[in-house]
Amino acid sequence: MDLFTAMDVSASGLFAQRVRMNVISMNLANAQTTRTVEGGPYRRRDVVMSAVGSGFQARNPLFPYIPAPDTFREALKTALGGNEIRKVEVVDIVEDPRDPKLVYDPSHPDANRDGYVLMPNINTMEEMVNLIATTRNYEANLTAINATKTMAQRTLQLGQP
């Protein structure tokens, strides 16, 4: 694997996590939105990500032609799609299928005859936990890019007197 492939894989992770942060921020910003263009309360959104091949096949440098002897390794290899290095890609942004919350608030302008309002299906604590996890994933990808950059710089320094 070359350094550019490592940077490309980490960059795809940065992009995917940035999209996820934006969607989480949108969810938090609309946690009290009871009217949308589509009608009804705002529906929580979530990002769907998928691993996609980079076209580079990783090989075991010590035993490039010897197949793995045990069945667990073969099963793992099959489950992971071979030894192909994968990038992450945002496939879709989907609405959460959970029903809106029914909250009693007769003074709200969107309350029905019985005084209930349909509120967004957003749990603020859940969104904050998702935001923290996304931030840590973003930081991990950034750290990997910086480590790759450092390795590239040190490799260039090897040839200098």
Image (tube, rainbow, N blue to C red):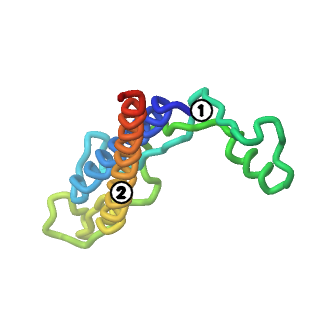
CA distance separating discs 2 and 1:
24 Å
Extreme bottom residue here? Answer: 104
Q: Residue at x 83, y 40 (%)?
A: 66
Instruction: Name the side, left or right, on which 18 lies relative to 70.
Output: left
Considering only order in the chain, which callout, 1 or 2, is on the residue closer to the N terminus? Answer: 1
Q: What residue does disc 2 label?
A: 136
Q: Secondary structure at mark 2?
A: helix
Q: Which mark is on residue 124?
A: none
Quick one: 3 or 49, which is closer to the camera? 3
| Residues tagged 2 and 1 counted as in contact (Cβ below 8 A) | no
Compared with residue 8, is residue 81 higher up or lower down, i.e. above or below? Answer: below
- The quarter in which the C terminus is drawn is top left
Identify the residue shown where x is 56% and y is 40%: 51
> Residue 79, image x and y in percent?
72, 48
Image quadrant assignment for residue 36 = top left
Measuring from the top left, give residue 6's x and y in whole percent: 48, 36
Mark 1: amino acid: Gly
Figure quadrant of the N terminus: top right
Disc 1 secondary structure class: strand
